[in-house]
Image: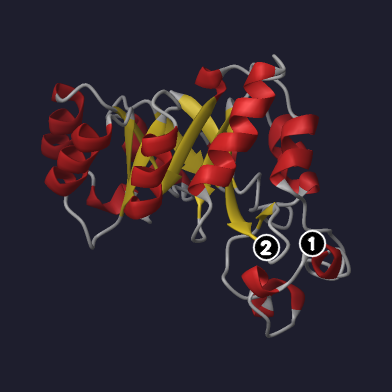
Amino acid sequence: MLKIGHRGACGYVAENTIESIQKAIALGVDGIEIDIFKCKSGELVLFHDQTLKKLVGRPERIEALTLQELSRCLVKNKYSIPTLKKVLDLIRAPLFINIELKGIDTAVLTSNLLTDFISQQKWEENSFIVSSFRWEELEKLRQVNKTIPIGILIDRRKTINDAIEFANKINAQAIHPYYKILNKKNIQKIKNNNFKLFTWTVNNKADIENIKQFNIDGIISSYPDRI
């Protein structure tokens, strides 16, 4: 069962920062989950919320600012907002990266960037999985990239059957359900359909131990050392 750091190791260090990713690596993770938006100048940057309010204390939407403008913003008055390119330059296999597409128009840019890194032999294709609640973005990704691994994110608004149907439609490799909707029946259904199963975001030690009994493929946690 793979240990995957949520937004790096955001239980310990501010989420989606280089420092949080480095903390996750120090804790011995197998993989790292990060979130991305496309900023106004076109670069893909790590961030989870649509606005800067919670982490930076500014009201703007992250998609409305250029990379230069974002470079003057500090997460929790301390950490810079990194680009996806910078993260891919810093991290190496055998770690893998789960890239969640948070914003619109991120699919094609993500495909182009990953293809570039793979062609330069800096990464292998199976070192990535791209996930999203924006299923339309995953569909766009599959249209331009037939082979990159895809994970279907779901919460209580979608059913396991919905996810399996869509996963088959776009030839996805994994389903990423919220851990509170998992039970033996739907876990077996996912396995029977030959999809990998990575669940999120399991932080409580008792919940982690409970989920581990299901023998799934991986757990995403803000405290990956608890897995």
Residue 206 in view here = no
Q: Which of 208 and 53 is in front in this view?
A: 53
| Residue at 58% across, 45% down | 109
| Residue at 24% across, 60% down | 156
Residue 58 in view here = yes
Among numbered discs 1 and 2, the one appearing first in the sequence: 2
Helix, strand or loop at mark 1? helix
Q: Point out residue 28 in the picture as x, y percentages from the top left corner.
A: 67, 26
Q: Quadrant of the N terminus?
A: top left
Quadrant hosting residue 184: top left
The reply to whether the C-beta atoms of the residues labelled 1 and 2 are less than 8 Å apart is yes
When the figure is inspected, residue 25 is found, relative to residue 23, above or below; the finding is above
Amino acid type at mark 1 = Leu
> Mark 2 = which residue?
39
Label 1 – label 2 distance at C-alpha: 6 Å
> Mark 1 = which residue?
67
When the figure is inspected, residue 123 is found, relative to residue 27, above or below; the finding is above
| Residue at 74% across, 81% down | 57
Helix, strand or loop at mark 2? loop
